[in-house]
Image: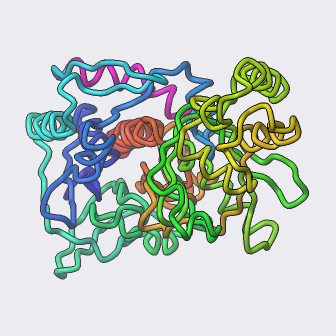
Amino acid sequence: MHEVIVIGGGPAGLMASVSAAEHGARVLLLDKGDKLGRKLAISGGGRCNVTNRMPLDELIAHIPGNGRFMYSPFSVFNNEDIIRFFERLGIALKEEDRGRMFPVSDKATTVVQTLLKRINDLGVTVRTNTAVASLEYDDGRIAMVQLKNGERLKTKTVIVATGGQSVPHTGSTGDAYPWAKAAGHTITELYPTEVPITSAEPFIQEKKLQGLSLRDIELSVYAPNGKQIKTHDGDMIFTHFGLSGPAALRCSQYVVKALKKYKQPTIEMRIDLRPTIPAEALFQETIQNIKAEPKKALKTVLRGIAPERFLQYVYERLRIDSNLPCASVRHEVIREIVQQLKSFSFHVNGTLSIEKAFVTGGGVSVKEIEPKTMHSKKKAGLFFCGEVLDIHGYTGGYNITCAFSTGYTAGKGAAEYVHHKS
């Protein structure tokens, strides 16, 4: 009989295996794919953003999907513990913008190989190409893992770490939701988060701004009544279908939720290209520049106020002849241009699919999980960790922090459960 069976070899499953073994349990790790750590190997653009070094309250604020639940797992294993864990294993880390922590090697494979070596050193048994069909119980406690090849594995505990439904080529195809349901768990509605946003606006369809990156902007989502729902700062890019980039990804879940809540075909978004300067100050500054160069063409004097391609589109949108000398341009026209730079409005109609998302929103309800151990409140000996749970953060090291933290907590919880019961 196995003491702990971990299902899923992603960030949460690997960390759960290490933790359970470090806490003295005999561990078997099962994965349906042919190699472990696939999602980890492509995370952070192939560099692996292992965690984020923000203070705990700020970290929780960057986990919009049930972040408060994470206070307990973080009390067991937090972002600083993650940093110490990897540094102890010989991976030097470096801090980049917004607290993101990367291996100095800039290679996600360093992280994957180090975790696999640790698992091996701890004597964890690994079986790849091993798909699970179902979990079986005896008198309300876990008893067996039924494999798709017909094999039955007796066990004292199971840690489910199979991921959500996003990035399916890494093996996250929602396998565990039926198992969780069969165990009596609630699966909250699944939706894509951290996903590019789509729009049917003519300027998008005609690819007028395709490939244009905007740096240090503010991107906002608005309700039909004109009330601001959410704003994120950062960078974004216009694509052939809509918009992408960090600020857009962070706004995406609010677009999904607003479309559903207001039952509207589209939702308004606005871009502030110059968030550090109030509209009136930008207007006055622009007027001064124009007065100083009355004979020069408008487009020459305004060059540098925003990216060239964006300005060209604004002139087109407002039907302004940008070749006119500044002296002949009315103040109202300048006000309109400034308005576009401070509040460029357009409508979006959704996002790419959950399979194209970086993260799955929704999952096994955290109300049915013991936060200090990740133990199921429905079945004894059953544990959950990682993205299969209804927990999600923004990109920037927050999701992987949740995966490592809940994984470590589940591993420790499962090992303690085994020793307590035996």
> Can residue 412 be seen in this snapshot?
yes
Q: Is residue 242 left or right of residue 382?
A: right
Q: Quadrant of residue 400?
A: top left
Q: Compared to 88, does 225 lie above or below?
A: below
Q: Residue at x 55, y 45 (%)?
A: 370
Q: Is residue 276 left or right of residue 70?
A: right
Give the image location of residue 31, x and y in percent. 21, 61
The main secondary structure of the magenta stretch is helix
Q: In this rendered view, identify the residue nearer to me: 215 or 255.
A: 215
Q: Residue at x 24, y 65 (%)?
A: 154
> Can residue 186 be seen in this snapshot?
no
Count of number-bearing discs = 0
Q: Quadrant of residue 111?
A: top left
Give the image location of residue 51, x and y in percent. 39, 30
Q: Is residue 6 left or right of residue 305?
A: left
Is 129 contained in the magenta span?
A: no
Q: Residue at x 45, y 36 (%)?
A: 396
Q: Residue at x 51, y 53 (%)?
A: 238
Q: Compared to 135, does 209 lie above or below?
A: above
Look at the image and tell me in which quarter the C terminus lies.
top left
Q: Is residue 65 left or right of residue 99?
A: right
Give the image location of residue 20, x and y in percent. 28, 39
Is 75 contained in the magenta span?
A: yes
Range of residues picked out in magenta? 72-88
Q: In this rendered view, identify the residue nearer to me: 406 or 171.
A: 171
Look at the image and tell me in which quarter the N terminus lies.
bottom left
Give the image location of residue 150, x and y in percent. 19, 82
